Image (spheres, rainbow, N blue to C red):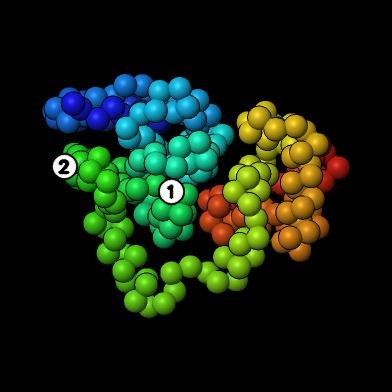
Amino acid sequence: MPSQILLVDDHKIMRDGIKAILRHSDDFIVMAEAENGTEAVQICKLKRPDIILMDIGLPGLNGIETTTEIMRYNPEAKVIILSMYDDEHSVVSAIRSGARAFVLKKASDGDLLDALRTVAKGGSYLSPQVSDRLLQRIQRGDLESKPVASALSDLSPRELQVLRLVAEGKSSKEIAVMLDLGLQTVRSYRKTMMKKLNVNNIAGLTQVALAAGITRFPIPVPDQKAVP
């Protein structure tokens, strides 16, 4: 019986391309699609797909955060992260969130099918380019920035989600809607993160997020009085 796949990507052209690849194999069938992390979590609760094939760069909850949410409800879920980027922070964060595989979008059709078959059997998979680079970093002993890793180690998964969204310029109201939280809860998270990270404002939180690679691009920080 073919493994049932939940395909999660906000670009329809990418989903259609992956479905075209999977049609050449009798081992897999796309049972559902989602355009964002929140939708993916809801589908996983209702339908329990065998494998979740998910883009890392989703709007709202990104692929890593969505994986963390899915694992809260189904620790046995088999998630494969797809990414345009092969930086170590993304790879390590994906694996730590519970993903079984990390596949580059520039990988061949054969590599994607290999990853799916490996994960379907209970194994793990990294794109060859990624595994080679990680091995080199491990051998040099500089896999990640120790000061930044230490600074973030006290943050909960939910706080990391809020930190990224704050750094991307989202207001507390927007974050509350995205994460299905109360407005005061989001504001409380912000205050707690500032204390834990020893910063005094949104700009400080943004700089920490950028240094950690949680968000890739500097976001213009609005005037502090304007941030609700």
Of discs 2 and 1, which sits in the foreground? 1
Residue in view at x 66 percent, y 30 percent: 180
Q: Position of residue 120 (x, y in %)?
A: 25, 40
Q: Is residue 205 above or below residue 145?
A: above
Give the crowd class for mark 1: few <14, some 14-19, many >=20 residues within 10 Å: many
Between the residue at mark 2 and the residue at mark 1, the CA separation in whole angstroms equals 24 Å
Q: At numbered mark 2, what does the secondary structure look like: helix, strand or loop?
A: helix
What type is the residue that disc 2 sits on? Gly
- 163 or 221, which is in the foreground? 163
Q: Residue furthest bottom?
A: 140
- 85 or 70, which is in the foreground? 70
Numbered mark located on residue 98 in the image: 1
Q: Residue furthest right?
A: 225
Quadrant in which residue 23 is drawn: top left
Give the crowd class for mark 2: few <14, some 14-19, many >=20 residues within 10 Å: few
Quadrant where the C terminus is found in the figure: top right
Numbered mark located on residue 169 in the image: none
- 63 or 121, which is in the foreground? 121
Quadrant where the N terminus is found in the figure: top left
Residue in view at x 62 percent, y 60 percent: 152
Quickly name the residue at label 2. 110
Q: Position of residue 182 (x, y in %)?
A: 75, 32
What type is the residue that disc 1 sits on? Gly
Q: At numbered mark 1, what does the secondary structure look like: helix, strand or loop?
A: loop
Q: Position of residue 80 (x, y in %)?
A: 34, 42
Instruction: First in sequence, mark 2 or 1: give its number.
Output: 1
